[in-house]
Structures are given as structure tokens and as C-alpha cells.
Image (cartoon, rainbow, N blue to C red):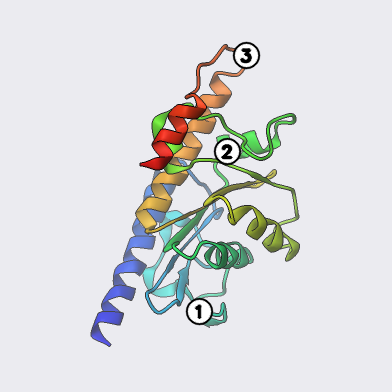
């Protein structure tokens, strides 16, 4: 019991710390975005509805059973299903970060991009931490049909971009999910800065070599 409580306390504090870091560095704003982490029991901790990631109370995080039933804590976010469907499809995932980060959202609105892989591999770290980024079609926030659309894309990618909404990124740990989300946002910024320029992304061979690592 002590070990379980210790793990939960650590994860609660880590979620609050990551949320504050993302908020302070303008990766999110207002009460947008949410973070979750999965306990070894399969239970999930998640930031609650209408909560700023910059001012989270670790003791008030929403807690869910492994089956997705709200057990305790503040009222859950209406986007809880985004996290739950990522965990269902990504069995190795220990955490999920969902943001409304500005540059990634901007990319999600551009017409004519490859919806199976929205961003070119501009850097090695993007290729390693994000890989391929599919677009999930637009659904209104909280629409239950979005879960199926996210799950379909998540089978082949641990990061997806919701059209006119923002990224959802899973990682083995909360730090891995955080770093991948940040890499996605910075690559989206680079992509927008370089539009109209001739670019030299990594080749398919270079990206595949990084993926094998």
C-alpha cells in the first residue's frame, strides 16, 4: 500500500510540475489543455475541467479506474475520453499530453497538407520523439465520435493532431510525452516560419535510421 501511495503522490506532483512548466513557457494558456498519467494499477490521474495547467492542485486531480470510471477528485474534463482512447490503443503509454498550442493548431488548419503525416521531418529530434503526425478530422469539443477517430489514428502513431483543435501525444512516461509535445510545437513553428522557402528535410532513409534507434 505504501508503494502505491508513493507512486500516486509522485505522479500527482509531477503532473502539477509539468503543467506549470508548459503554462509558464506559453505552450498552453487559460484553462486549455489537459494532462494524464497512468498508475501501475491501470488507474489514471488527470487534470480536471476548467483548471489552468499553471495552477494545478495535486490533491484535486481527477482519478479514474482502469475502466475509465471517475473515482475521486474534481469534475473530469470533457476531453477525458481523448486520454482514455490513447491508452487503449497505446498499451505502452504511461502518460498523455493534450494542448491547444498555437503553432500546432495553425498547422491543423492549413489545407493541402498530407493528412497522413502533416509535418516534414525537419530535425532529428522531431523524427525520434514524434515520428509521423496524422490529422484527425474536426469534431466539436467533447463529441464522443472523436474518440473513435483518435483511436483509429493512434494505432499507428503515438502523436495525433486534431483539426482546428490541437495535439494529443502519448509517451511511456510523463516526461517523454511532455518532450514529444514540445518538439511537435517547435517543429510546427519552424514549418510555419519556412513556408515559401525551399527546405531540406531529413530524407526517408535518414528518418528510418533514426526510427530504428
Q: Is residue 87 above or below residue 121?
A: below
Q: Are marks 2 and 1 in contact (CB under 8 Å)?
A: no
Q: Are marks 3 and 2 in contact (CB under 8 Å)?
A: no
Disc 2 and disc 1: Cα gap in Å?
Answer: 30 Å
Q: Residues within 10 Å of mark 1 (few under 14, many from 20)?
A: some
**Which residue is label 3 attached to?**
196
Q: Is residue 24 above or below residue 111?
A: below
Q: Is residue 2 above or below residue 89?
A: below
Q: Position of residue 84 (x, y in %)?
A: 57, 68
Query: Which of the marked residues, 3 or 1, is nearer the chain's N terminus?
Result: 1
Residue located 35% across and 53% down the image: 175
The kind of secondary structure element at disc 3 is loop
- The foreground one among 56 and 140 is 140
- The foreground one among 130 and 34 is 130
Q: Residues within 10 Å of mark 2 (few under 14, many from 20)?
A: many
Q: Is residue 159 above or below residue 188?
A: below
Q: Are marks 3 and 1 in contact (CB under 8 Å)?
A: no
The kind of secondary structure element at disc 1 is loop
- The foreground one among 114 and 180 is 114
Asked where in the image residue 115 lies, by quadrant, the reply is top right
**Which residue is label 1 attached to?**
66
Q: Position of residue 157 (x, y in %)?
A: 55, 50
Residue furthest bottom in the image: 1
Q: Position of residue 4 (x, y in %)?
A: 30, 81
Quadrant of the snapshot with the C terminus:
top left
Disc 3 and disc 2: Cα gap in Å?
Answer: 18 Å
Residue located 44% across and 76% down the image: 42
**Which residue is label 2 attached to?**
104
Amino acid at each position: 500500500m505504501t508503494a502505491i501511495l508513493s507512486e500516486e503522490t509522485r505522479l500527482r506532483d509531477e503532473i502539477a510540475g509539468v503543467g506549470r512548466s508548459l503554462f509558464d513557457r506559453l505552450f498552453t494558456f487559460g484553462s486549455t489543455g489537459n494532462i494524464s498519467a497512468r498508475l501501475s494499477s491501470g488507474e489514471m490521474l488527470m487534470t480536471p475541467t476548467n483548471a489552468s495547467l499553471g495552477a494545478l492542485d495535486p490533491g484535486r486531480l481527477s482519478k479514474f479506474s482502469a475502466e475509465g470510471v471517475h473515482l475521486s477528485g474534481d469534475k473530469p474534463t470533457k476531453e477525458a475520453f481523448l486520454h482514455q482512447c490513447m491508452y487503449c490503443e497505446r498499451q505502452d503509454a504511461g502518460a498523455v499530453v493534450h494542448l491547444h498550442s498555437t503553432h500546432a493548431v495553425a498547422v491543423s488548419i492549413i489545407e493541402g497538407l498530407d493528412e497522413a503525416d502533416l509535418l516534414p521531418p525537419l530535425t532529428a529530434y522531431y523524427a525520434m520523439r514524434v515520428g509521423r503526425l496524422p490529422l484527425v478530422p474536426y469534431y466539436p469539443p467533447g463529441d464522443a465520435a472523436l474518440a473513435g477517430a483518435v483511436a483509429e489514428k493512434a494505432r499507428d502513431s503515438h502523436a495525433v493532431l486534431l483539426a482546428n483543435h490541437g495535439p494529443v501525444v502519448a509517451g511511456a512516461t510523463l516526461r517523454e510525452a511532455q518532450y514529444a509535445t514540445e518538439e511537435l510545437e517547435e517543429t510546427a513553428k519552424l514549418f510555419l516560419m519556412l513556408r515559401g522557402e525551399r527546405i531540406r528535410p531529413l530524407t526517408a532513409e535518414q528518418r528510418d535510421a533514426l526510427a530504428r534507434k
